[in-house]
Image (spheres, grey):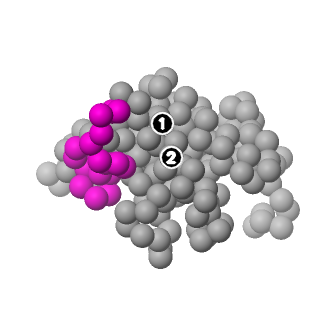
Amino acid sequence: MADRIAGSATVLQDWVSSLSFMQQTVLLTAVRGPDGVPKYGPTKMLLRWYRRCILLSAMDQAVLTTPYAFGGGSFTGPSYGPTNHAHDWESEMDVTVGQYLRELDAIPHHFQLHLLHAVEIVGYKHPVERIRNWWRLTYVRLVHDMHLWPETEEQLDRRLGDSREQWLERNDPATVD
């Protein structure tokens, strides 16, 4: 067991390891939700689905591929209860995103940016097309809510491609060492 913990065991889904280190880091920064929001509110329900898309469920030791399936405990648990519309989880989760956006003034801006950037990565890089497409559309919603334009996948890869020089191209000098 000690070798497994000290060795290559990881809670990250396999696809995450194909990303640059910077992109992996961004994914991890959004895993923990902000303090002070309800455990069963839209922010945490959106995060549960996000976590299912990048992490293995520790309790199930498996990838949970829908936002509604049983399992995962409270950290990677279902984002909504059983319904007759399980085949249309996108619509159910779109409602959650709308609720999240309506409560955005109560969410720390710092967390919102971590989530927005992480959602962008999942929206461009997740290996399952259906999941990837839903997160990409969610990224567009989050960006448009801020009255901004989405970054392209190529721009993302350049900004977060493990090159300090490329990262500096889009960084403000005030935030450099």
User: Within 10 angstroms of label 2, few (less than 14), some, or many (20 or more) residues?
Assistant: few
Q: Nearer the viewer, residue 99 or 152?
A: 99
Task: Work out whether 128 lies above or below 52.
Answer: above
Asked if residue 128 is positioned above or below residue 62 in the image, the reply reads: above
Q: Position of residue 148 (x, y in %)?
A: 79, 47
Is residue 164 visible in the rendered image? The answer is: no
Q: Are marks 1 and 2 in contact (CB under 8 Å)?
A: yes
Residue occupying the far front of the picture? 84
Tell me residue 16's x, y (percent).
Answer: 45, 38
Considering the numbered disc 1 on the image, is that residue within a helix, a strand or a loop?
helix
Which residue in the structure is indicated by mark 1?
Answer: 91
Name the quadrant of the C terminus: bottom right
Q: Circle 2 sits on which residue?
A: 95
Q: Give the residue at x 60% y 71%.
A: 106
**Residue at position x 68%, y 35% in the image:** 157
Which residue extends farthest left? Answer: 1
Which quadrant of the figure has residue 88? top left
Residue type, mark 2 in image: Val
| 173 left or right of 114 in image | right
From the viewer's perspective, is 73 left or right of 34? left
Q: Which mark is residue 54?
A: none
Say which residue appears at 62% left-offset and 63% top-offset.
104
User: Is 155 above or below relative to 33?
Assistant: above
Determine which quarter of the picture holds residue 108.
bottom right
Residue nearest the observer in this picture, 28 or 63: 63
For label 1, count other residues whose C-alpha is less than 10 Å away and answer few (under 14), some (14-19) or many (20+): few
Taking the magenta stretch, the answer to whether it contains residue 167 is: no
Residue at point 65% right, 68% down?
105
Q: Give the magenta range.
A: 70-86
Q: Residue furthest bottom?
A: 36
Q: Where 105 sits versus 116, above or below?
A: below
